[in-house]
Image (tube, rainbow, N blue to C red):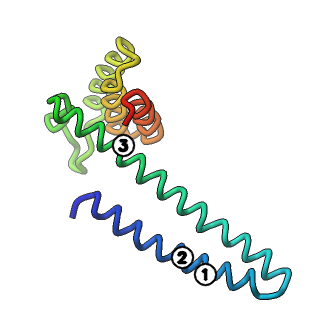
Amino acid sequence: MNARRVAYILTAVLAVYLVLLAERAYTLVTSGTAVGAVLGLAILILPILGAWMVLAELRFGSRTETLARRLDEAGELPDVSDLPRRPSGRVERDAADAWFAERKAEVDAAPEDWRGWFKLAQAYDLAGDRRRAREAMRKAIELGNA
């Protein structure tokens, strides 16, 4: 099962949960008591927030996939399969650091090129820095107009 299918299945399960949570909130709001109404309104915030977060993540994933497809069609999608790996499957630290330095130099040389930012995001991910990987990918999306 590919990642996209898993994401859609999990989104559907979450949507069912959010609908049930919204139903419970509605029941509390219409209970006729002040405490029930306040609690119901507080609970109603959770499905709204959850739906917004899911949509934002799906949009981020879709845009990332669009950029990856564009790089692949141009034959520029980075191949990291030759990097040495630990028994766990993670890239060895020295190799990830060296690969990161190369990608960082590309971005420094052409800071307005979305391709460099995409590759830098992958380098951050290989180094285990997910927060910076997402930031770099957001920059690539912004520059690549995905």
| Residue at mark 2 | 19
Residue at figure coordinates x 46%, y 70% from the top left = 14
Question: Disc 1 marks which amino acid?
Answer: Glu
Residue 23: assigned label:
1
Position in image of residue 30 (x %, y %): 75, 84
Which quadrant holds residue 64? top left
| 117 versus 12 height, above or below | above
- Mark 3, Cα crowd under 10 Å, few <14 / some 14-19 / many 20+, is many
Count of labels in the image: 3
Q: Residue at x 28, y 24 (%)?
A: 98
Q: CA distance from mark 2 to mark 1?
A: 6 Å
* Amino acid type of the residue that numbered disc 2 sits on in the rendered structure: Val
Instruction: Identify the residue under disc 3.
Output: 63
Mark 3 lies on a secondary structure that is helix
Residue 83: tell me if it is visible. no
Task: State whether residue 105 appears in this view.
Answer: yes
How far from the left and from the top, in percent, is residue 99?
27, 26
| Residue at disc 1, secondary structure | helix
Q: Which quarter of the image is occupied by the N terminus? A: bottom left
Tag 2 near tag 1, CB within 8 Å: yes
